[in-house]
Amino acid sequence: MTDIINGLAVQTHRQRYNSGMIWLHWSTVILVLTLFGTAEVWDFYDHGSDVRAVLHTVHIAAGICLAAVFILRVLWRLISLKNLPEDEPGLMGLAAKAAHYALYLALAGQVCLGFALRFSQGRDVPFFNLFAIPRLIDISRDYRHAIGELHNVLAWAIIAVSAIHACAAIFHHVVLKDGVLKKMLP
């Protein structure tokens, strides 16, 4: 197993991200879209309905998965630093780096807010009834609505920056034809 992980971390070309980085990137994309989608859809259902309960369950489980993938992604990036493709030069490279840092910071904040929201409700964080992450800190119920608002605003910010990021990758692929998109394709 260690050889497989080591192989993924060092198997690289200067033109592409390694397999681990690619897998973690697309896992993050899928989880973020799942989290955003479930949160936006559940308000169409009545409180207490089965569909709304399932959407909440999926949302919380996907949030736990995002926390794990995010931690793994940060660690993997640190392990892979020497093998990452070279940064793009100039203003576009600076913008790309800023977007990446903004997304990493926003994802970290979003995961923390998700846990804080659940803790402020006086609840543990269950994963499909298989296990639950216990409340690690006590947060007053008085902060529940403020934390929920921040969680919602940050979700929209993540979607906005991700959309700009995706459009920039498509621009590179279609207009500039410089291979930037291919660095992260599976």
Image (cartoon, rainbow, N blue to C red):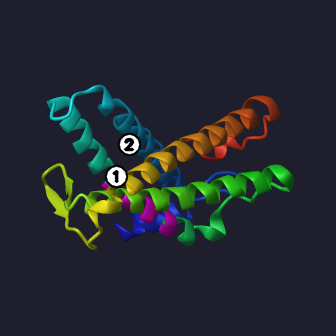
Labelled disc at residue 135:
none
Q: Position of residue 141 (x, y in %)?
A: 27, 61
Residue density around tag 2, few if under 14, some if 14–19, many if 20 or more, within 10 Å: many
Q: Is residue 174 magenta?
A: no
Secondary structure at badge 2 equals helix
How many numbered marks have been drawn onto this rendered protein structure? 2
Q: Quadrant of residue 59?
A: top left
Which residue carries the number 1 mark?
Answer: 63
Amino acid tagged 2: Leu
Which residue carries the number 2 mark?
Answer: 35
Residue plotted at (65% across, 62% down):
84
Residue 57 is left or right of residue 117, and the answer is left
Residue 116 is left or right of residue 55, and the answer is right
Amino acid tagged 1: Gly
- Seen in the picture, residue 169 relative to 19 is either above or below; the reply is above
Residue density around tag 1, few if under 14, some if 14–19, many if 20 or more, within 10 Å: many
The one nearer the camera, 22 or 91, is: 91
Magenta residues (range): 64-75
The one nearer the camera, 22 or 129, is: 129
- Contact (CB < 8 A) between labels 1 and 2? yes
Residue plotted at (15% across, 59% down):
131
Quarter of the image where the N terminus is located: bottom left
Q: Is residue 67 magenta?
A: yes
Residue plotted at (25% across, 27% down):
45
Residue 15 is left or right of residue 50, and the answer is right
Can I make out residue 66 in this image?
no
